[in-house]
Amino acid sequence: MTVAKENTEIRLGGVGGQGIALAGTLLGKAAAIYDGKNAVFTQTHGPEARGGASRADVIIGEKAIAYPFVTHPDILAVLFPEAYEKFRPDLKPGGVLIVEADLVNPSAEDADAVRLPATEIAKELGSRLATNIVLLGYLVGATGVVSREAMQDAIRATVNKRHLDLDMRALDAGFELADRDTPND
Amino acid sequence: MNTQTDSSFSVVHPIDHLMRADRLPHILCAGCGIGTVIHSYVHAINEFGVDEDRHVCVSGIGCSGRAAGYVNVDSYHTTHGRALPFALGIAVYNPELTVTVISGDGDLMAIGGNHFIHAARRNANLNVICINNFNYGMTGGQVGPTTPVGAKGTTAPQGSVEHPFNLPHLAKAAGASFVARWTVLHVRQFTDAVLRAMNKKGFCFIEVLAPCPTSFGRRNNLGEGLDEVEMYRQRCRIENGAQDLEPLDIDIVDHEQTITVGNFVDIERAAFLA
Amino acid sequence: MAKTAAKIVPPQPVSRVVTGTHFMLGDHACAEGAMAAGLDFFGGYPITPSTEVAEHLATRLPAVGGKYVQMEDELGSIAAIIGASVAGARSFTATSGPGFSLMMENIGLAAMMEIPIVIVDVMRASPSTGLPTMVGQADILQARWGSHGDYGVVAYCPSSPQECFELTIDAFNAADRYRVPVFILMDEVVGHMAERVVIPDADKIPHVSRKRPQTKPGVEPFLPYAPDKDLVPPMAHAGEGYKVHMTGLTHDERGYPHLTADTHNQLINRLIDKVRLNAPDIIDYEERHVDDAETVVIAYGCTARSARAAVDYARSDGLKCGLLRPKTIWPFPATRIERLINKGSVQRFIVPEVNLGQLRREIERITQLPVVGLNHAGGEMPTPKAILEVIKS
């Protein structure tokens, strides 16, 4: 018996302070409000979220989403070593793996993982606080899981005006890196 | 004032309109002090000058908790210990109402003790009259949070071994804006204290000592209700504005000890959402 | 759903009703439902996983002139919301199992005094402290029977953030309409997940007012506990001049204590009957493929999400399977289930729950057919696959 899978499951993993929950919310918002798709967002709570690895899960689909939890992500993006170790085993075979280049050293079997210098780019743009937005830009640019316009709209509608300029530049930087990696798209 | 037209002599009592006469006879024992407290409370409403429709009386459970049932204002007889948070809900939602809580020492200070300190801490806009008769009277005379060490109750047949609360000290420490202690002997002073509380924003607390001859007095050699009131006359010392409330413990069964009464605290402090 | 981008109305943070399309936590959607319903007073005590409801209202409610109070404990929270309600407020608190247990005392007072209040219980795995951040559905029977004595209540069970918004509005309307304590039995999964929530224009929010006295205060007599034909008495508020007396003691139509067996029997029967007789207007449920179903899954809250997927998969495999999803757990839609049984096609029920069979017992009470449970004591919800396996078994 197999249960057909119609949805895209995305897991963002990191450590407290890396803006994982906000990134997940923005992704869900882009899908559910601005792309008119269905999306569910969940995150770690309580002891599970204290120290160690935290996660933000988003499921995006055309139809209403029943079970709200990510079991085997199609896309896994991790910004911290512990998150890589904890969540890597769940990645769907053939799924997309994105790791923060300076913090996470993927094992040999993940030689084709995307090594994204998200923190470094964010720092160059003005603040490491935009690391999560660089990641979103790359993830959206490379996978098309939501439209770039929807992602921009979600950020405009959500983030503090003081950070908007930085965040939009961070998003664009992520888009550009994705375009460089997938020039035919 | 209404007078009956079919009688040449019948005059309505000036506070009749504030009493639910259709609830008589009341449940209180002969010699009980609660009736005197209700008398002072309704006189204060009458003299306060604010429309009686804008007064609310909230009680908890126990003999004192029945006070709300006899006064003819919007009145709520709630659960044991919860009169204060119930009253807080009324006062915060409608700050134009004058809300008075009348309840007993067990209700307000034992089962409701946490609500008491927090209502005082917030300086909730409530007048609180605590009728202290040193025991749980309605259920037959069990010891409570104000029972003096050595005083007897059905649950402490050899005498209580616990230290009691000093209520004015507690109220002041918790943040009350107005704190007083009187007895049912001091009808004018007590009525005046209730009026002052009604005129003041914030948490106003008045302890009033009252005889409970049926359940407490007879077990503790205090005699009839009137004997206990006579004892108040002999032992009470008025000290308005007393600064140090810590020494004001009451040992009602020790006839040698002075009982200090008065209006102790009257400070200005921002009232809670008032 | 069609692309909605063109119709998006930017949220207006200082209005009561934030009309527009949102991506919102269930807890926040519940708080917004309360705001839209006209919430006046919130008294609460923080507790996981309901804290987000309180936090959201701490900002939202005072901004529109409402009163927000963080109480010293849940005993105080519920007393304060009953107090505010007797003064005329639409009042509300949010809690979870341990706090819900403390509230049982004054749930009885609200039932006995007939004071409208709304409580959301975001259920976590229990008993006692249990698993504070993880899901449970084991407060179902506590909501119905938790305070001592017999009384009627209404309880809603949302399955999505959108329903958290909508059923919270229904909860306020039912509380005022029937003068009963009303519960929203959310679970941690639904409270802590974000999904699209569409909030309509303010004039599209359903509103049912309390029945109010028809007599003038102080002129004509008013009996605060004289019921109308629907068994619900009109309600006078503190400060209006009716000089009501209300008590948790057994009382007569004047509201005065009347401590006799006959008065008690009459009063308590009315408290039960006013929910029982009005149940057809209160009960709400959703059905999917039940018409010819041989297997009917009955599920609520987060569990119903997996149940819906499982039933759809089973149908696509040709199995005659349907879903009955009660949105009101109390009163329980027993009549609807009896009608399903009487149609003859149903051969068994499956009841997945994050408890050890609480609602299953209600279904077993009304049928001789097999009622199969899929139970977990708490901490996780069943997957569609797990429910599908039971359907296929």
Image (cartoon, grey):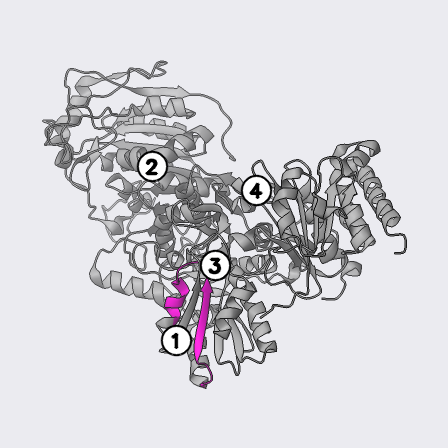
Chain for numbered disc 4: C
Label 4 vs label 1: CA separation? 44 Å
Percent of width and height locating residue C242: 40, 52
Disc 4 element: helix
Could you say which disc has been placed on residue C176 in the image?
3
**Callout count:** 4
- Going by the numbered disc 1, the residue's amino acid type is Pro
In the picture, the disc for residue C370 is: 1
Callout 3: residue from which chain? Answer: C
Of labels 4 and 1, earlier in sequence is: 4
Instruction: Give above or below for B203 relative to C37.
Output: above
Q: Are marks 4 and 1 in contact (CB under 8 Å)?
A: no
Say whether residue B98 is left or right of residue B155: right
Q: Residues within 10 Å of mark 3 (few under 14, many from 20)?
A: many
Identity of the amino acid at label 2?
Answer: Gly
Give the quarter of the image for residue C144.
bottom left
Looking at the rendered structure, the secondary structure element under dot 2 is loop
Q: Residue at x 50, y 59 (%)?
A: C171
Three-letter amino acid code at the position of disc 4: Glu
Q: Secondary structure at mark 1?
A: loop
Q: Nearer the viewer, mark 2 or mark 3?
A: 2
